[in-house]
Amino acid sequence: MVFYFLRPSLRQVYTDPKLRWWEHSKRYVSSYNAAFTYKEVRGDGQIVNLSKTGLLLKTNIELTNYSHIDLLVDIGDEKLPITGEVIVHEQIKNGFGIKFDKTSANKTSAKKIIKKLKNNQPIP
């Protein structure tokens, strides 16, 4: 308790939302289709949900952890490119998590998709 009041750097971890790593971004339900390239294999899938940092992709193609993937998300009036890394997690059934690369193009694409999904309720 004493360290909390004496050390502003410790206090900042709890008060600055950008440093609260344990909190997740809001996720939005989606049914957009995506074409992807993964290790020279082309495939199709459906985006189950999406946030500003990643998405959940449902596909029949087996993906491996920490592999690079390029996606082209069809939002109706345009197709948006997103690149990322496959994150396989035991709790995810029937899909694969994709963590976006930290590029401005990915941020722009994610913002456009989320803007279209804003009418959907975020998943808690």
Image (spheres, grey):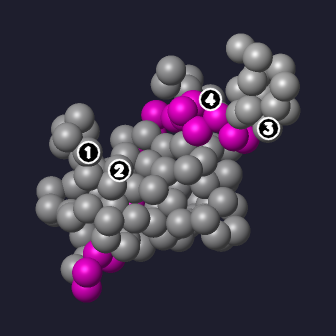
| Residue 3 picture location, percent across and down | 75, 24
Q: Which residue is mark 4?
A: 119
Earlier in the chain: of badge 3 and badge 2, it is: 3
Based on the displayed image, in which of its 4 quarters is residue 39 positioned? bottom left
Q: Which residue is mark 1?
A: 89
Relative horizontal placement of residue 47, taking residue 11 as reference (left or right): left
Alpha carbons under labels 1 and 2: distance apart: 7 Å
Relative horizontal placement of residue 69, taking residue 52 as reference (left or right): left
Q: Amino acid at mark 4?
A: Asn
Secondary structure at numbered mark 3: helix
Q: Residue at x 71, y 14 (%)?
A: 1
The numbered mark at residue 7 is none
Can see residue 56? Answer: yes
Dot 1 and dot 2 residues touching (CB under 8 Å): yes
| Residue 73 picture location, percent across and down | 47, 61
Earlier in the chain: of badge 1 and badge 2, it is: 1
Q: Which residues are magenta?
A: 18-40
Q: Amino acid at mark 2?
A: Gly
Q: Residue at x 55, y 50 (%)?
A: 53
Dot 1 and dot 3 residues touching (CB under 8 Å): no
The numbered mark at residue 9 is 3
Alpha carbons under labels 4 and 2: distance apart: 23 Å
Nearer to us in this view, 12 or 36: 12
Q: Amino acid at mark 1?
A: His
